[in-house]
Image (cartoon, rainbow, N blue to C red):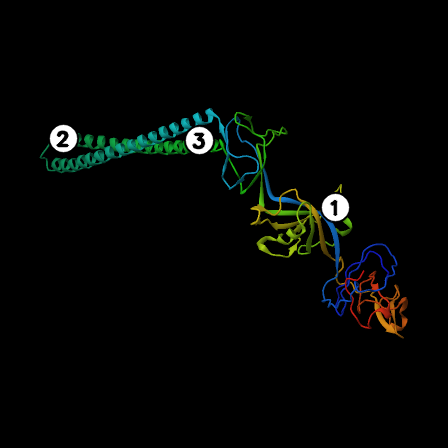
Amino acid sequence: MSYRGAAATSIVATGLLVGLTVIPGAAQTNHHKLTDSHTVQIAQAPAGEMQRQVELPVTVESYERAEIMSYVRGHVGQVHVDIGDEVKKDTVLVTLHVPEIKAEWRRRLKLLAKAKADLASRQSEVERERAKGAQLEAAKKLYQTRLEHMSNLVQSKAVKKVKLDEAQYAYESALAASESNNAEIRAAEAQVISAEAAVHVAEAERDKAQALMSYLEIKAPFDGVISERNVDTGDYVRPPTGGNMPIPLFAIENVQRLRAIVNVPIQHARQVDVGDPIQFRTIRGLPEQMLRHIRAPGGKKELTISRYAKAAHNVSRMMRVEIDLDNPVIPETGKRLLQPGDYGMITAHLSEENRTEKAGTTRVRKQHSRVVSMRPAANHPHSPRRDWQPLSYVDFAVADDRLHREERVVIYRLDLVQDGSQLQNLC
């Protein structure tokens, strides 16, 4: 068998009736005689996009990871979980002992009660003034009626004018008392508004103290596993301040869903696209037969690229690519299939950079029981067949009607196979 090629890729194109394995590497020539172990296998290669298979290292990370720190200063009262424990969202991880926060919370409750009592008192004052105003309004109407009656009597000379003056004075006094009462009602209502505002302030202060109280119970932000514990009962803890970062109390990681991280070299970065298929080849420490249990979210068997950075790292010159994974529990062991920190190898099927490129293609045809592989001249990619230049003369070539530029094929001696046979996995 003879092989001629440079770093080659799998051929998948319309009209190809051959499935084959192409070996990447430098140009080389090998000679083998087909034996019983080299069986000719028939295969149909479907039409599709040209793809490049790249084998790359992969590292598994948790989908979410949080370092748990204290929001307040204080001493640890009780630790409720340990490393390796699986916890649900809002599970209490640690309880802090900070007496002054509890005392402040109780003080705020008392201040709120006082503010509410003051509000109730102000509201009662308004009601009292309104009741007084109703009495004064009735007295004003009475004195007004007496004034009108006395005015009639004076006009009929039944009474002296001095009586009219007395009635006039009584009415005006009642009118002034009513207006004064209205002012007192407005002042009392303003006091009610002030008291209501004081209640709202007291409620806000109560809520703040209650929020500080809630920080005494540090809870899990999501479902996950405790991967680090750096705290014990009695430890003094504090929140991060400025650039001085304390050691986190816990680290929690979501292991129900994972991210497979691949750093793609810059020479392949432009070929990466969301949806490109990948296959796990190895995971260190995981039996090969267990790789079949790796699934995409939703239980899908086909693993594809979920997202990529669209920029290379300015030091490593590699681009970060992520593949989302489900992480099921294996019934036989009761443990999850993967864990953060696992590493291995994957094969990524990357799309060609220029998927529509057709210029400079290669054609293979038969001539006098031999196959002549020819291609157009570089300066005339679409020249007629008669102007094509010979590329190589071989006994038998596996190729299709149109191949991408720089493509190479595996070739075999014609006398060892039947004319027209398709070859696959022979090397």
Residue at point 20%, 30% (across, down): 169
**How crowded is the residue under tag 3: few (<14 C-alpha within 10 Å), some, or many (20+)?**
some
Amino acid type of the residue that numbered disc 2 sits on in the rendered structure: Lys
Q: What element carries label 1?
A: strand
* Closer mark to the observer between disc 2 and disc 3: 3
| Contact check, label 1 and label 3, Cβ < 8 Å | no
Q: Earlier in the sequence, mark 2 or mark 1?
A: 2
How packed is label 1: few (under 14 Cα within 10 Å), some, or many (20 or more)? some
Q: Distance between the residues labelled 2 and 3?
A: 63 Å
Of all residues, the one furthest to the bottom in this rendering is 368
Q: Tell me: 126 left or right of 69.
A: left
- Residue lying at 83% horizontally and 70% vertically, measured from the top left: 417
Q: Name which quarter of the figure residue 372 lies in.
A: bottom right
Quarter the C terminus occupies: bottom right
Mark 1 or mark 3, earlier in chain: 3
424, 327: nearer the viewer: 424
- Tally the marks: 3
In percent of width and height, residue 387 lies at 90, 71
Q: Secondary structure under badge 3?
A: helix
Q: Residue 163 carries which label?
A: 2
Look at the numbered disc 2 and give the secondary structure of its residue.
helix
- Residue 420: x and y in percent read 80, 72
Could you tell which of marks 2 and 3 lies nearer the N-terminus?
2
Q: Could you say where residue 253 lies in the image, as x and y percent from the top left?
A: 58, 41
Q: Which of 205 and 19 is in front in this view?
A: 19
The three-letter amino acid code for the residue at tag 3 is Glu
Q: Mark 1 points at which residue?
A: 318
